[in-house]
Amino acid sequence: MKKMITVLFLALGLSTFAQERGEGRKDLSSEEMATLSAKRLAMQLDLNEDQEMKLKALYMTKMDAREEGREENAEKRAEMMEKRDAMKEKREEMREKRKADSEEMKADLQKILTADQFQKWEQLQEKRRKGRRSGNGTIRN
């Protein structure tokens, strides 16, 4: 039991530490991030100043391209949401039209059929609806 509690606290501490570590980077500009990354790699690989400057330029180029990609993605996402909303509206209009057509058909049939025939027709329609809902894939006429 003590080991489980220790593991739980350790996991909680690590997750908190990982979250705090990532938050500090959000405050840095792209240039500062590129400089830090270049300096870190320069220290690890023992690079000269020329290599470090080229590495910083490379990081800046990649960060700018990534930022442009984010902006494009945001625009595309907004465009897709607009299209999705338009499709929802169109679907709803189509559903309402089908419902109105169905009600009109029902009223016309009621004028043509006798009361018993109409009642039988309604029962057949209900049976059909239940058959579709059951998911067996067969629709009987």
Image: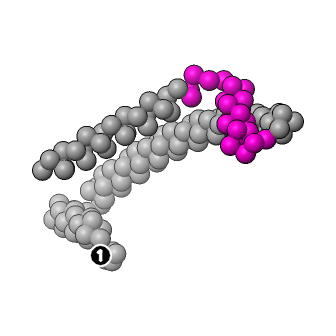
Residue 61, image x and y in percent? 79, 36
Residue 7, image x and y in percent? 25, 47
Q: Residue at the location (53% across, 43% down)?
A: 84
Specify the quadrant of the image occupied by residue 76: top right
Specify the quadrant of the image occupied by residue 138: bottom left
Q: Which residue sits furthest right?
A: 50
* Tally of numbered tags: 1
**Residue 92 in view, yes or no:** yes
- Are there few (<14), some (14-19), or many (20+) residues within 10 Å of tag 1? few
Q: Residue at the location (29% across, 71% down)?
A: 135
Residue 39 on the magenta segment: yes
Q: Amino acid at mark 1?
A: Asn
Position of 129 with respect to 104 (left or right) is left
Q: Residue at the location (40% across, 34% down)?
A: 17
Image quadrant in which the C terminus is located: bottom left
In terms of depth relative to the viewer, which is nearer, 124 or 69? 69
Residue 119, image x and y in percent? 17, 62
In terms of depth relative to the viewer, which is nearer, 107 or 100? 100
Q: Which residues are magenta?
A: 25-47
Question: Which element is circle 1 on?
Answer: loop
Q: Residue at the location (73% across, 39% down)?
A: 42
Specify the quadrant of the image occupied by residue 131: bottom left
Q: Which residue is mark 1?
A: 136
Q: Main secondary structure of the magenta part?
A: helix
Residue 129 on the magenta segment: no
Position of 111 with respect to 43 (left or right) is left
Position of 75 with respect to 25 (left or right) is right
In terms of depth relative to the viewer, which is nearer, 85 or 26? 26
**Residue 141 in view, yes or no:** no
Residue 106, image x and y in percent? 31, 55
In terms of depth relative to the viewer, which is nearer, 99 or 93? 93
Position of 128 with respect to 57 (left or right) is left
